[in-house]
Amino acid sequence: MSIEIVRLKIVANTNDGVYGVDIPFKTGLFLLRVENTHGKSTCMNAIAYALGMERALGQSGARPPFPASLTKSLLTKEGKEVSIISSYVLLQIKNDKNMVTLKRTIVGATDNNIINVYEAPLDLVPLHSPKPLYLHREGDTSRDLGFYHWFGKFAGWNIPLVPNHNGGESPLYPSVIFPTWFVEQKKGWSSIQATTPTYFNIKEPKKRAVEFVLSLDVNENIKKRNSLKSKIDDIVYQWKLIKRKADLISAKVSGVVTGIPEQPESKFDNYKIDIVIKTEERVISIVDVKSSLENELREYSPLEETISDNYSLELATLESIREHSDKIKDLEILLQNVSDERSYIHYQISATKRRISNLLDDKRKYEDIRKIADSNTFENSNILINECPTCGASFSDNLLELSVKDNVMTYEDSLSFIKEQIKAFEFVLTDSDKQLQIKQAEQKQLETEIANLRSNILRLKSHKNPSIAIQEDYLRKKINLENGINDIDEALNELLQIKLDLETLFKRYMQLTVERKKLPASVLSVKDFEKVKFLNESLKNRLDKYTFSSFKVEQIEISDENYLPTREGFDIGFEVSASDGIRMIWGYLISLFMVGKKFGTNHPGIVIFDEPRQQETNKFSFSELLKDAARSSVDGGQIIFATSEEEDVLVQALVGEKYTMCAFKKADGKLIRKFA
């Protein structure tokens, strides 16, 4: 849906009456001809201000983009200074269906972050009630009373969410889109979309703006990619939480969980998930540990069978203490061995990390060597031929003379070897980490068992009644067996739920990865390529008309990466003269305008240039621009030029073309003048 500027009125209430300017606009090419310093840019900035786009004018801060003549005081034609009491802008615009008038305060009692929308032409505004809409506040792009939300609907836009630098999404504010069809005088001519605001935290804002204006499918593809990435990242995060939960569950039974990778992978099998416990020289499943405990509990003799009538309770107590002491000695030996093994594994992990770090450093060096070797800088020189430039004798580039039989690896072979070494040592590191976890669990189990045995010895020694002490020791062992079995049952039940949860996450993960693979390798669709191709051809044709001369126009291509003009794959920056840089902006923005007419894009169907003849661009080029603008907008759309060029030059350049000119004579003074 196209937008048209119908009428602009700037009003300043002073202590000397009402001052301002009232300009009617027309479709097609419209020329606002005003002398320099007489208010031309003030009018263009007023259009931007009324549309809520002042943050795309390249100025720092959030103050209104107007001179003192609209904010503090102005000089009358007679040279008298009068104070501004209040001032505001009225802008009448229309789309394919509706006509509205926007009113925004410059200075006065009303908040200038409120824009009043009147469903009426400018002259009938006093007879209608406004709809106040806010901007530059949260919700201005999404809520019913947000101005950008309203403007998006008026322009026929569905304002998309685009990636931001925080890893989330932000609305593509209309202020970011504005420089694709509006060029202000002071900073706007330094480069294409020069005044694009960056403080909205949007990633690649210029690129996102052009994608939107061209209605490229890439917006949807990028959104799908980001959505899939976000969902996959969420699954990986949940996976890590569940793995952490599994580690805690296994720790309760002095075990280590196995079979759960750090994140989902294609080889994942939930049947391989288990909790294992290290006992002496064996690593056994917790299920086998449970069976062993159950057998031990079944074979546990009743106390009355263990101690006969003629068996001394004192001897039984001493025997129990001796058994506990002997077991503690055995366990302490095992504990020392485990501690030694842990120390060795720690050393192995540290050494492996150092080795990987060194290999990564070597990898970077060989990659740099490859970059240099791939360069053609020395291709036509005699530097690499291993021949003395003085006597012509050949020499070896090695410190040691090598025979033909000696096999020296090339840098490519060395790089491949290093990469394989890194993979191997990373596997060693992962395996060592797992072994360390097992040893830590084993150490914790041994320490707990030793502590319990010592506690039992202390209890047996300190108890005054041997009979009760023996009974308590017996019951404690039995209860510990029963508790151990119960703990394992709880761990197995929780592990079963973890298996189900991981299986659900894994299926979802595989589904999302399949969806991601189905996305096109290129984010551009066939229709997108057609639009970019048309933009490219249109730009070249225009630059040829405008006498672009920094290099051959045929060398210019629109990049598939950022949709900006490039030369042989490189961005066009300092390669063009200042005047050719201006021609590039002319051609690019009018070409975007033409793509919109041919393909029906999100382009609003309007282009506004404030003083397009910059850098003393020659009159022939400017004349061609005027003709091109007139012909491009003759069958629809609006191109507005605010210029200080002499009126007769404009008229002569546009002989035979359709256009509208609103010219203000120098003798009449500034544009902001007293209303009759």
Image (tube, helix red, strand yellow):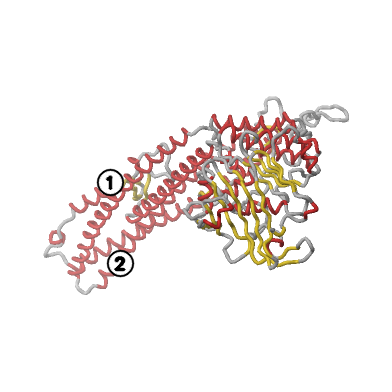
Pointer 2 residue: 455
**Which residue occupies the extreme bottom position in the image?**
464
Residue 555 shown left or right of residue 325 in the figure: right
Q: Amino acid at mark 1?
A: Asp
How many residues crowd around disc 1 within 10 Å: few (fewer than 14), some, or many (20 or more)?
Answer: few
Q: x%, y% of residue 325?
A: 31, 62
**Which residue occupies the extreme left position in the image?**
309
**Residue 226, relative to residue 9: is it above or below?**
above
**Which residue occupies the extreme front position in the image?**
676
Q: Secondary structure at mark 1?
A: helix
Q: In the drawing, what numbered circle is on residue 433?
A: none
Disc count in the image?
A: 2
**Which residue occupies the extreme right position in the image?**
390
Write down the quadrant of residue 380 in the picture. Answer: top right
How many residues crowd around disc 2 within 10 Å: few (fewer than 14), some, or many (20 or more)?
Answer: few
Q: x%, y% of residue 50?
A: 60, 53
Q: Out of 551 and 119, give the one closest to the viewer.
A: 119
Q: Does residue 349 appear in the picture of this structure? A: no
Q: Amino acid at mark 2?
A: Ser
Q: x%, y% of residue 79?
A: 79, 64
Q: Out of 616 and 99, give the one closest to the viewer.
A: 99
Q: Secondary structure at mark 2?
A: helix
Q: Does residue 195 appear in the picture of this structure? A: yes
Separation of residues labelled 1 and 2 (CA atoms): 28 Å
Q: x%, y% of residue 309?
A: 11, 65
Q: Mark 1 or mark 2: which comes first in sequence? A: 1
**Residue 22, relative to residue 592: is it above or below?**
below
Q: Residue at x 18, y 69 (%)?
A: 468
Q: Out of 504 and 624, give the one closest to the viewer.
A: 624
Pointer 1 residue: 288
